[in-house]
């Protein structure tokens, strides 16, 4: 593989990782010279010698240095390959797209994760393909059923970090159904979230929804209730410029539902509560979400993302139409609140 050849980027990921396929789609969109490498036991040494955290994707730059974390990776690709840009020129749309990217990474991930590791059929399929993939080409591959059990043992406790617990189940299921319904209404009228070309927000949502489509439970739901969403997921695997971004006025009616039902009262509300809990050193985060209790383990990392969103909003907070939209969709207070976020994780 061409690590450090001065020309290629290398994405070490897995097809079962939403953050990995998100970065791959972004690289394809920008025409980045790159190669994809499936993470497996065969490259475990390389992975361990570069990875700072045990997460994929691990991305190698052409000079051989490496980086992790899909959001800053997308920002770096935008700098290195400015056209086609991920961002609409309209500052309001650009901000909404940045918020949707984070919503995908941090909230839709919970919805996917809840089904993937919480439902027996999904857990079985996913742990099996992960274990087989990790051992592919290895003499140890006959041990894949054992590794599959280890995968389950690693991932199920991680559900606590994702907020996938019994108390939250009704909220997460409702959130999933809302999202599919709202996206279906929005995407039945256009090929991408902001018009005829993909934006930053498409990539964040795509990563998680692509995974949901692979899994039995969410996949069946998407095929039954979200044919336009399924078509968009498939389009996002090789996204391209098919025309222009739309204007705010034409996008607004169906974007509004996504923001007012999901982004404001769920994702941002949890983000603010989590941030307060981080600042207070509280191990658990609790909040009232649409009249019900939501709780999960406090998690430092999303507070960094929320601080990033506030900074992006601060730069455009005078835009009147945007302010009104965010206010009416229950997002404004969270984006304006004085941050107590840590600057790094
Ligand atoms: N915030 C990171 C998250 C990356 C992440 O969670 N990767 C998952 C796969 S999608 C992983 O490597 N999980 C391995 C594990 O939890 O052991 C990003 O955006 O890249």
Image (spheres, rainbow, N blue to C red):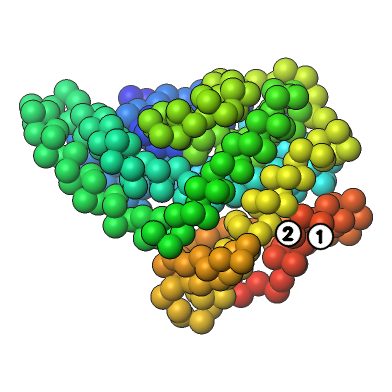
Around disc 1, counting alpha carbons within 10 Å, would you say few (fewer than 14), some (14 to 19), or many (20 or more)?
Answer: some
Q: In terms of depth relative to the viewer, which is nearer, 37 or 63?
A: 37
Q: Relative to residue 192, is residue 19 depicted above or below?
A: below
Pick out the residue farthest to the right. Answer: 320
Q: Is residue 45 left or right of residue 34?
A: left
* Pointer 1 with pointer 2, Cβ within 8 A: yes
> What residue is drawn where x is 52% and y is 60%?
302
* Residue receiving disc 1: 327
Q: Kindly indicate the quadrant of the structure image that contains residue 161.
A: bottom left
Q: Quadrant of the N terminus?
A: top left
> What residue is drawn where x is 56% and y is 71%?
287
Q: Is residue 225 left or right of residue 92?
A: left
Pick out the residue farthest to the top. Answer: 242
* Residue 150 is at least partly visible in this image: yes
* Residue receiving disc 2: 331
C-alpha span from label 1 to label 2: 6 Å
- Residue 108 pos. (x, y %): 53, 46
Q: Is residue 332 left or right of residue 168?
A: right
């Amino acid at each position: 593989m061409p690590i450090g050849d001065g020309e290629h980027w290398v994405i070490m990921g897995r097809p079962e990782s939403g953050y990995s396929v998100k970065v791959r789609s972004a690289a394809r969109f920008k025409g980045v010279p790159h190669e994809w490498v499936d993470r497996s036991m065969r490259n475990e040494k390389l992975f361990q010698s570069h990875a700072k955290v045990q997460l994929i994707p691990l991305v190698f730059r052409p000079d051989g240095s490496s980086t992790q974390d899909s959001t800053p990776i997308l920002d770096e690709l935008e700098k290195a390959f400015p056209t086609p840009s991920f961002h609409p020129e309209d500052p309001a749309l650009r901000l909404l797209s940045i918020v949707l990217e984070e919503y995908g990474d941090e909230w839709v991930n919970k919805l996917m994760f809840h089904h993937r590791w919480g439902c027996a059929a999904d857990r079985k399929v996913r742990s099996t393909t992960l274990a087989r993939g990790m051992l592919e080409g290895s003499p140890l591959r006959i041990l894949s059923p054992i590794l599959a059990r280890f995968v389950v043992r690693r991932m199920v406790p991680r559900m606590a970090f994702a907020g996938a617990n019994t108390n939250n189940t009704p909220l997460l299921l409702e959130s999933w159904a809302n999202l599919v319904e709202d996206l279906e209404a929005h995407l039945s009228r256009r090929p991408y979230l902001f018009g005829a070309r993909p934006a930053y927000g498409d990539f964040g949502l795509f990563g998680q929804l692509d995974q949901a489509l692979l899994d039995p439970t969410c996949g069946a739901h998407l095929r039954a209730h979200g044919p336009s969403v399924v078509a968009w997921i498939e389009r996002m695997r090789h996204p391209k410029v098919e025309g222009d971004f739309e204007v705010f006025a034409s996008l607004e009616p169906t974007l509004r539902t996504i923001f007012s039902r999901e982004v404001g009262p769920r994702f941002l509300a949890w983000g603010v509560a989590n941030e307060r809990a981080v600042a207070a050193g509280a191990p658990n985060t609790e909040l009232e979400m649409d009249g019900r209790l939501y709780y999960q383990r406090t998690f430092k990392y999303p507070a960094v993302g929320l601080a990033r969103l506030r900074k992006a909003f601060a730069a455009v907070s005078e835009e009147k139409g945007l302010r009104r939209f965010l206010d009416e969709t229950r997002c404004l207070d969270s984006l304006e609140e004085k941050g107590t976020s840590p600057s790094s994780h």
